[in-house]
Structures are given as structure tokens and as C-alpha cells.
Image: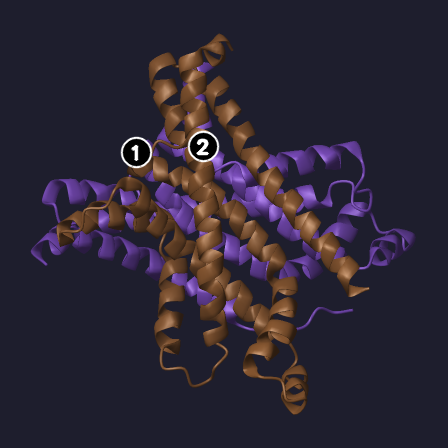
Chain colours: A purple, B brown
Amino acid sequence: MEIAIAWLPRLLVAAVLTIALSAVIFTLSAAVGLLLSLVHYGREKSLPRAGIEAFSAFFRSVPELVVLFLFFFGGPQIGVDFGPIGSTIIAFTLVGIAFDYQVFKGALKAIPFGQYEAGLALGLPKPVVFLRVLVPQILPLARKGWITYAIGTVKRMSIASAVSVSEILYVTKQGIAATNAPFTFLTLAVGLYILIVTPLLVFNERKPKQAVAR
Amino acid sequence: MNILLDPTYQRMLLDGLGMTLLISVIVIIVSNLLALPLAIYMQRPDGAFRRLIIAYSFFARAAPVLALLFALYYGLPRLGIYLEPVPSALIGLIFASTAYNLEFLRSGFESVPQGQLDAARALGLKPFAIYWKVMIPQAYRLAAPSLFSNAIQMVKGSSLASLVAIDELTAASTTIIAETYKAIEVLLVVSVFYLLIAAVIIGLQYLYESRQRLSRR
């Protein structure tokens, strides 16, 4: 118990880092994933879309740890040192974009293409059709998949401990090495992850306030 | 690229690939076999172990897989249980994977309309027949995409075993990188291996789904 109290401040700092990194990665991947899902809308067979699909397939199939190593070890090889935190953000954001793109693409499929055509026929500029017609409808549809992925992002942060990012699991490992009390530390660590994730879980289970306007 | 022509490194990568395949196949098969009876049990509204299963499922899905692996790797010896690294990692990965498969199957079962159950009972089908002929085929049809994508997640999850002393594909790559400093070449080759495994799983999914479409005609 004394061990736990002595290490709690360090674990809390690690938890804050975990939350901050997750938030950055979550926001970037959602924004870029959404943008990519709108590229060549209605022309899914076009070359740019094939490129995006290949990108998405690669980053969804290769383990996050390998992607992380690719930037962490591969960066210095070509003369760019991303550092532990930089590599983590780049690697997990790319993986996040690959997943979020699929989530938003799926949501977009549920909206009749005629809405887009009608918008253009009314003389609305394309960005307005996207921002005022499509995006407001995609977001509620995509919410569930998107938040499920966000929960994964928090848990996935534990993998960054492999490149010495001092997030929760890294500090936990240090604690285990210093005190030889694995269960105390892992209980604390898992408790912290659950604490961070629970609000997202609760939010995800809630029914959306309004149905999608048709 | 010449380091990849070195037979020693080729051997290491292929051994690593073998271990990754072994771990993935065991985890995928066992977690699917365990999830089905649990999901069926959860269909009983009065089951005594319902809460236990719900708590297990929540915990296994909320805790990071790597934390589970560490708990087994560092924790079990403290309890006087000495497992080899491979079985210990298998337990951790199966523990996590079963919870996801259980949830996918559970929602598959729940989406079978109650009317079908009533009709099956009215026809005098035994509980076993109700599951085998009515519930299971429909639940799997609905859960299949999620079960297949969880299988890919587990192949990716097996890379975390490299952090608890298992010489699988990712571990082989870090060893070679430490000796040669050729990170990009080695990691791209390793990525291609993982892509191929994922491609095989996606291929199996298409096969399953096209057979489903044929049998529904």
C-alpha cells in the first residue's frame, strides 16, 4: 500500500501523458480520416481512392508495434530523429487515420448519393455540400465505430512503452522493476486505463439524442 | 537490401514467422471455441454466472493486452507459478480475444427475432436443436465480419508477445535491427509478412461470405 502511494504521483503524470497523447492522436486521425473519406466522393474506383484504400489496408494489417518501430528505428536511418513521442504520434495517427477512414466511409455509404447531387443542382459550392449536408449526417452515424476506436487508442498507448514513452505501462514497468510488486502496479495501471476509458464507454452506450434527418 | 540475403537473418525471420503463425492460429481457434458456449450461456436470463462473465468481458476489453501479458509474465512467478513464455502469452492473448468474440456472438444471438425462438419451441425442437439449427447459423452470419476482423487484430496482438520474451516475427526484426541498423528494410519485410497473413484471413472471410450467399438461395 505504501508503495502504491509513493508511486501514485508518477503514475498520475503518466496518466495525463496518456490522455494528452490519445487526444492528439484521436483528433488528428478523425479529422484526416473524415477528409480522406470525402476524396472523390461517388467515384470509389478512381486512382486516388485506390491509393487511400491501399494505405488503409497497410496500416490496418501491420501491428502497431511494427509501425512504431518503423518510425522510431527507421527515422534515424534516413537522418530524421522523431524521438519516442514523435514516433508514437506519427505511427498511431497513421494507424488511426486508416481505421477512421473506414468508419467514415461506411457512414457515408448510408447517405443517398442523390443528396450530394441535389446540393450541387441547387448551386451550392462543393465544400458547403460537404460541410452542411453530408458531414452533419455522417458524424452521428459514425459515432459508435469512431468512439470504439478512440477507446482502443487509449489502450494502444501502452504499446508506446516499448519505445520508452513514459505513459502508464512504462511507469508501471519501472515500478515493478524497482519494488518487485507486480500485482500492486498492474492493478493500479489497469485501474487507471479503466478510469480513462469508462467515460467513453458510457458515452458510447448512450442512445443518440436525435435520429438522422432524412 | 543485402542483409536480407544473409541466410542467418532469413532463418531468424522465417522462425519468427512460424512462431507468429503458431500463436495466432492457437489464439484464434481457442478463443472462438471458448466464446461460443459463453455467448450461449449469456442467453439465459437467470444464469448464476452472468455477472461474472459480464465483469470478465468488461475487464478483458478495458485492460490493454500488453498489461495482461505483463501481469502473466511478471505476476505469475510471484504466485509460485512458473510458465514458459509461450503458454503465458497464449493465456493473455486468449483471455483478451475471447471477450471480444463473446460480445460479437452475443449481439449476433440477440438479433435473432424472439418470434423464431417461439416458433422453434412451438414446433417442439429441443434446446440443442434450436441452437444448432436456428440460432447459431444466424448469429455467425451476423458476427462473421467482426470475428474475422478480430482474428486480424489477434495476429497483430501476437507482435506484443515480442515484449515478453517470445521470439516471434517482431522480436526477430528487432534483433536483426540491433545487429545491422537496417531498420527500414527489415521492418518492411516484416510488414509484408503481416500483410500476407491478413490477406489470407480476408480471403477466408470472402470464401465464407460467398458460401453463405449460395446457401441462402
Q: How would you rate the neighbour count of disc 1 (Cα within 10 Å): few for under 14, some for 14-19, many for 20 or more?
A: some
Q: Is residue A113 left or right of residue A30?
A: right
In this view, the residue in front, B207 or A177, is B207
Identify the residue at the far top of this view. B2
Q: Name which residue lies at 44% across and 12% down.
A: B7
Q: Quadrant of residue A60?
A: top right
Task: Using the numbered discs, state the Cα–Cα distance from disc 2 to disc 1 in whole angstroms.
Answer: 28 Å
- Place of residue B135 in the rendered image (x, y in percent of width and height, measured from the top left): 61, 74
Q: Which residue is mark 2?
A: B18
Q: Quadrant of the N terminus of chain A?
A: bottom left
Q: Is residue B171 above or below residue A44?
A: above
- Place of residue B103 in the rendered image (x, y in percent of width and height, measured from the top left): 50, 65
Amino acid type shown at disc 2: Gly
Q: Quadrant of the C terminus of chain A?
A: bottom right
- Place of residue B81 in the rendered image (x, y in percent of width and height, measured from the top left): 17, 51
- Count all numbered tags in the image, as a single digit: 2
Chain name for mark 2:
B
Q: Is residue B30 left or right of residue B145?
A: left
Q: Which residue is mark 1?
A: A164
Q: Is residue A132 visible?
A: no
Q: Is residue B165 left or right of residue A139?
A: left
Is disc 1 placed on a helix, strand or loop?
Answer: loop
Q: Name which residue lies at 22% across and 42% down.
A: A173
